[in-house]
Image (spheres, rainbow, N blue to C red):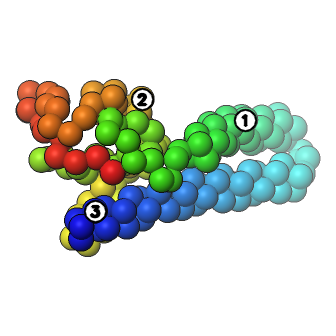
């Protein structure tokens, strides 16, 4: 019973980590866009007109790149909002905490490693190589990754 409760807590912490990951990246990108817009408006014409135009073009290219990153992040945010927080199914799906004999995975978005004492959880997307391998599997199923056989011990 204690194991199940600790997995519930770990799962909630992993979800919260994913939310924080998205929000931090969103804030950082929005701040970079504001800085670029400020740089674009403060860019004044100098006697070297070509240099001025090149500077504006470079700022505009950077702004477009950040805009694409922002659009991707908004898609990630939408996906995260669809992750069921109380999923408790016998097979691995979106929102599952998968405990294997090697690692613990939270299937949601690719947010990296969440370190919770004493365990680490890898927050991964269902589209990652491991996400594809475990999706639809059940407790006791074995999958092979990088030449290593890995067993699913529990799913929460």
C-alpha separation, residue under disc 1 versus residue under disc 2: 26 Å
| Mark 3 vs 2: CB contact within 8 A | no
Q: Nearer the viewer, residue 92 or 35?
A: 92
In the image, which is nearer the foreground, mark 3 or mark 2?
3
For numbered disc 2, what is the local secondary structure? loop
Q: In this figure, which residue is indicated by the disc labeled 3?
A: 4
For numbered disc 3, what is the local secondary structure? helix
Mark toward the start of the polypeptide (3 vs 1): 3
Mark toward the start of the polypeptide (1 vs 2): 1
Q: In this figure, which residue is indicated by the disc labeled 1?
A: 64
C-alpha separation, residue under disc 3 versus residue under disc 1: 46 Å
Q: In this figure, which residue is indicated by the disc labeled 2?
A: 127
Asked where in the image residue 10 lies, by quadrant, the reply is bottom left
In the image, which is nearer the foreground, mark 1 or mark 2?
2
Q: Residue furthest left?
A: 148
Circle 2 residues within 10 Å: few <14, some 14–19, many ≥20 = some
Name the quarter where the N terminus is drawn: bottom left
Asked where in the image residue 79 lies, by quadrant, the reply is top right
Residue 27 visible? The answer is yes
For numbered disc 1, what is the local secondary structure? helix
In the image, which is nearer the foreground, mark 3 or mark 1?
3
Q: Residue furthest front?
A: 1
Q: Residue at x 16, y 46 (%)?
A: 153
C-alpha separation, residue under disc 3 versus residue under disc 2: 27 Å
User: Can you give x and y, in whole percent of width and height, for residue 36 in the image?
Assistant: 76, 51
Instruction: Indicate left or right for 9 with 84 as reference.
Output: left
Residue 58 to residue 14: above or below:
above
């Amino acid at each position: 019973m204690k194991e199940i409760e600790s997995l519930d807590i770990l799962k909630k912490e992993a979800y919260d980590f994913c939310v924080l990951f998205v929000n931090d990246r969103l804030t950082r990108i929005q701040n970079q866009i504001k800085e670029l817009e400020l740089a674009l408006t403060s860019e004044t014409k100098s006697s070297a007109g070509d240099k001025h135009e090149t500077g504006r073009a470079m700022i505009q290219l950077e702004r477009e790149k950040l805009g694409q990153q922002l659009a991707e992040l908004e898609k990630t945010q939408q996906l995260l909002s669809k992750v069921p927080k109380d999923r408790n199914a016998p097979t691995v799906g979106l929102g599952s905490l998968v405990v294997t004999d090697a690692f613990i995975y939270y299937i949601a978005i690719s947010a990296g490693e969440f370190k919770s004492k004493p365990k680490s959880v890898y927050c991964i997307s269902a589209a990652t190589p491991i996400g594809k391998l475990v999706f639809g599997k059940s407790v006791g199923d074995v999958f092979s990754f990088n030449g290593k056989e890995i067993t699913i011990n529990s799913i929460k």
